[in-house]
Image (cartoon, grey):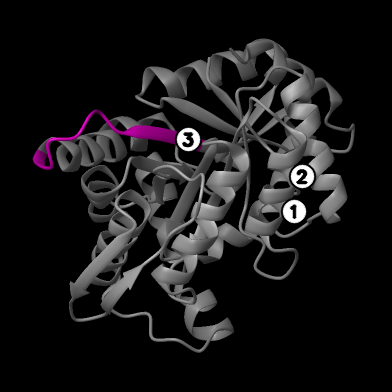
Amino acid sequence: MRITILIGGEPVGMFKAPEDVVGDAVAAEEDGFSSAWCIHFSRGIDSMTMLAAAAQQTSRIELGVGVVPTYPRHPVALAQSAATVQSLSGGRFVLGVGVSHRPVIEGMHGLDYSSQIGHLREYLTVLDGLLGEGEASFAGDHYRVEAAINVPGTSRVSVIVGALAPGMCRLGGELADGVTTWLAGPKSLEEVVLPAASEGAEAAGKPSPRVLAGIPVAVDADRDRAGAAANRTFGMYGNLVNYQRLFAREGVDGPADSVIAGDEETVRSRIQALFDAGATDVWAVPFDTGIGTGATRDLLADLAD
């Protein structure tokens, strides 16, 4: 199984010091994981800078970030950062981007959150030119760019789109290398994510898309304890419209029903179900139910290719 392990802290913002995140990357490589991703820390350390540091202390493991909000960061600036990390890592970097959510973009950054599909289409077009050919000449509704970058030692950076809805998934297949989801179960992967991403890739004449299924994981046979911990840690997602739609599609009440938790056999089976539904990778996020994450980490390392 291709298991991507989270480094750096939980998606709710419980992040670590930079040196500890670098240590997480080193440990992930030593434990046999082929891929380690961090989240974009909206209120903490800069994820790109941290991954550049991690690249200097590792030699084999893929390093990724998911996902960098596109609205606050111009594609030329992001391309420069991504190409630099790619050079420092020797080609092991993967860039995840996405439109984020209205409360973040409008509430935190004070930016207009309209026309998400049109915005991301133009953003990815500019990004692809800069990260592929090193230049972009583009005039659209959202961006007008005449730019070039030249980062010695870099190579084409793989780009993944954070997506849940069909339109974004199609863009991920068409203009990027695939998609990453969060809290999506087998039903959504099989019925929405994979078909839409594959449709986009086919229309663009591209290979089958990469699909990273991001999911919280805990080895804990006490279902009540695990459910309570999931609600405490991930309950905020129930307040976001995109996730409300996701939970309705999956037929679950909220995050506690979406996480993977249970004894080892249950966790193995539910991770396998994500692969069976079309995931190429499972981005596993160990979460603490009150008994630590050691058993979870050990199981994930055992499952990793």
SS at mark 2 in the image:
helix
Numbered disc in front, either 3 or 1: 3
> Mark 3 highlights which residue?
213
Labels 3 and 2: the sequence-earlier one: 3
Please name the residue shown 26% across and 65% down the image.
136
Q: Which residues are magenta?
A: 203-213
Q: Earlier in the sequence, mark 3 or mark 1?
A: 3
Mark 1 element type? helix
Q: Please give the name of the residue rendered at 24% of the width and 63% of the height, measured from the top-left corner.
A: 121
Give how far across and how far down residue 92 sits, in percent.
Answer: 55, 35
Q: Which mark is residue 250?
A: none
Residue type indicated by callout 3:
Ala
- The answer to whether residue 10 is seen in the rendering is no
Looking at the image, do the residues carrying marks 1 and 2 touch, with CB atoms under 8 Å apart?
A: yes
Q: Nearer the viewer, mark 3 or mark 2?
A: 3
Check disc 1: other Cα within 10 Å, few if <14, some if 14-19, many if 20+. few
Q: Is residue 122 left or right of residue 84?
A: left
Residue kind at label 2, given as amino acid type? Ala
Count of numbered circles in the view: 3
Query: SS class of the residue under badge 3?
Result: strand
Q: Which residue is mark 1?
A: 232
- Image point 21% across, 41% down: which residue? 196
Q: Quadrant where the C terminus lies?
A: top right
**Residue 242 placement (x, y as % from top left):** 41, 60
> Dot 3: within a 10 Å radius of its alpha carbon, few (fewer than 14), some, or many (20 or more) residues?
many
| Separation (CA) of disc 1 from disc 2 | 5 Å
| Left or right: residue 257 compared with residue 126 | right
- What residue is shown with label 2? 229
Residue 154 vertical placement versus 74 (above, below)? above
Q: Amino acid at mark 1?
A: Arg
